[in-house]
Image (cartoon, rainbow, N blue to C red):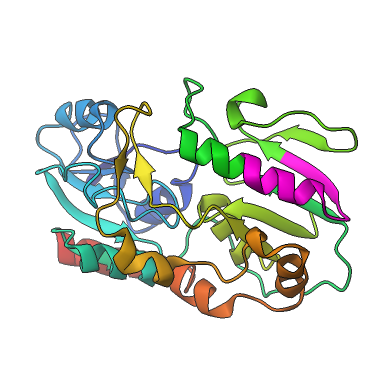
């Protein structure tokens, strides 16, 4: 089979590599199958429309990223199936009525490692919710960044802020003693004793690597769009917010960091990281899809 793939932030290499290992041919034109990380915003629709004869299959835009079609974006009628990296995202999508088949292929963003507790918290990395490429960050995410930042500034830690985009666009500001590092949207993480992040790809990847994590900004619905005036919110947030909730939250103060440092969020990890990706899982999914 000939396939093409849109690589989102260097995240799709394991999938592409597995496809080629299974004997499929990576092509730029006239594929039988297009693997893409989203199917609804105008940019993605234009790409999909440029491959009129290809079967369309989605892989995750991020993790856990299951809310996009919960009243925010319309499902593209050409999409045949969704490849989920974890069981929890698929269960949430099925719960709110995502119409396409969902196939679990396992966690592919990094090699997993066992949880490593730490006795003393010193270096903490704060990964704020990042703006879009045009610098826009909605007011809810910006307010969540500010609230978490202010809470961390009061704690006895050495704080590093790993930011995407400039510091003001994240809603933050320089403070003496706080280190700022430009992050990369390539799945890489920053060395730290503990990470504070929203429940997204950075937190989930760090959890998968066995590092203590604390979440923030969990009390507002998932949302997306391109301006504060046109924001759309997930319609069934109240149905799955507790299921998605990470157990350690910075709103509970320094005690949350101490708890996260010693005890893994094993239940959350089993749902939203889960088993490691294998080519065999991918092959089984493709056999069912095709």
Question: Quick check: can you spot residue 104?
Answer: no
Estimate the x, y position of residue 187 in percent, counting from the top left: 57, 46
The answer to whether 11 is drawn above or below residue 218 in the figure is above
Task: State which region is magenta.
Answer: 146-161
Query: Does 112 lie within the magenta span?
Result: no
Estimate the x, y position of residue 82 in percent, counting from the top left: 25, 56
Give the farthest residue toward the top: 134
Residue beneath the point at 47% across and 57% down: 219
Using residue 48 as the reference point, say whether residue 7 is left or right of it: right
Looking at the image, which is closer to me, 140 or 93? Answer: 140
Question: Quick check: can you spot residue 163?
Answer: yes
Looking at the image, which is closer to me, 64 or 188? Answer: 64
Q: In which quarter of the image is residue 223?
A: top left
The answer to whether 41 is drawn above or below residue 166 in the figure is below
Residue beneath the point at 69% across and 74% down: 115
Query: Does 151 lie within the magenta span?
Result: yes
Residue beneath the point at 82% across and 50% down: 154
Estimate the x, y position of residue 245 in percent, counting from the top left: 48, 67
């Amino acid at each position: 089979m000939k396939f093409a793939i849109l690589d989102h932030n260097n995240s799709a290499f394991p999938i592409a590599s597995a496809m080629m290992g299974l004997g499929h041919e990576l092509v730029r034109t006239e594929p039988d199958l297009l693997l893409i990380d989203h199917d609804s915003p105008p940019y993605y629709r234009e790409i999909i429309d440029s491959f009129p004869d290809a079967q369309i299959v989605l892989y995750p835009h991020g993790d856990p990223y299951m809310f996009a079609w919960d009243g925010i974006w319309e499902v593209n009628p050409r999409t045949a199936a969704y490849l989920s990296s974890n069981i929890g995202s698929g269960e949430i999508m099925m719960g709110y009525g995502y119409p396409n088949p969902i196939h679990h292929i396992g966690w592919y963003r990094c090699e997993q490692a066992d949880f490593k507790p730490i006795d003393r918290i010193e270096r903490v990395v704060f990964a704020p919710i990042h703006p879009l490429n045009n610098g826009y960050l909605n007011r809810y995410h910006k307010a969540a960044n500010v609230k978490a930042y202010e809470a961390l500034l009061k704690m006895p830690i050495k704080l590093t802020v790993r930011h995407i985009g400039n510091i003001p666009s994240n809603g933050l500001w320089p403070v003496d003693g706080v280190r700022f590092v430009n992050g990369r949207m390539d799945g890489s993480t920053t060395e730290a004793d503990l990470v504070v992040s929203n429940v997204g790809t950075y937190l989930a990847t760090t959890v998968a690597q066995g590092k203590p994590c604390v979440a923030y900004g969990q009390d507002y619905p998932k949302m997306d769009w391109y301006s504060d005036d046109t924001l759309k919110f997930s319609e069934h947030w109240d149905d799955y917010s507790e299921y998605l909730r990470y157990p350690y939250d910075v709103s509970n103060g320094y005690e949350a960091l101490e708890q996260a440092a010693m005890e893994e969020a094993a239940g959350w990890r089993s749902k939203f990281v889960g088993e490691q990706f294998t080519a065999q899982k991918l092959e089984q999914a493709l056999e069912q899809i095709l």
